[in-house]
Amino acid sequence: MTLSAMQLPIVRIGNSQGIRLSKSLLERYQLGREVEVELRDDCIVLKPIQAPRQGWDEAFAQMANEGDDALRLPDVFEDESNLIDELYGDTILLV
């Protein structure tokens, strides 16, 4: 990670104050109309807002390609299999 520093003036924006970021900075760091603000002890961090589950499709496809998409737990536990047989018998339900 490359760290660089720059000085920006604080400007009046209505009754508030803020900083202006150049278009090239906004594009470089993929900042849109809103940002996530993280307050730390000695600094303020601005991050792009990411959509929930962003990148999951690609991750799942990669897992499938690598054969790493096997179930970690069985679909039915041994103690549940009798209950399912009693309830449904040989009937297969498609939901």
Image (cartoon, rainbow, N blue to C red):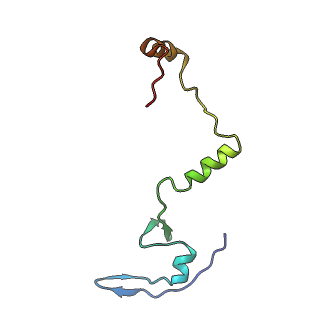
Q: Nearer the viewer, residue 4 or 48?
A: 48
Quadrant of the image for the N terminus?
Answer: bottom right
Q: Nearer the viewer, residue 53 or 1?
A: 53
**In the image, residue 13 lies at what x, y percent?**
34, 85
Residue drawn at 60 percent across, 53 percent down: 58
**Relative side of 13 to 25, left or right:** left
**Relative side of 28 to 88, left or right:** right
**In the image, residue 20 lies at what x, y percent?**
45, 84
Q: Is residue 70 above or below residue 61?
A: above
Residue drawn at 61 percent across, 50 percent down: 59
Residue drawn at 48 percent across, 22 percent down: 92
**In the image, residue 23 lies at what x, y percent?**
51, 83
**In the image, residue 89 lies at what x, y percent?**
47, 13
Single out the residue that lies furthest toward the left.
Answer: 15
Q: Is residue 52 above or below residue 29?
A: above
Q: Is residue 75 above or below residue 47?
A: above
The number of discs equals: 0
Residue drawn at 46 percent across, 29 percent down: 94
Which corner quadrant of the image does residue 67 belong to?
top right
Q: Nearer the viewer, residue 46 or 56?
A: 56
Q: Nearer the viewer, residue 59 or 24?
A: 59
Quadrant of the image for the C terminus?
Answer: top left
Q: Is residue 59 above or below residue 43?
A: above
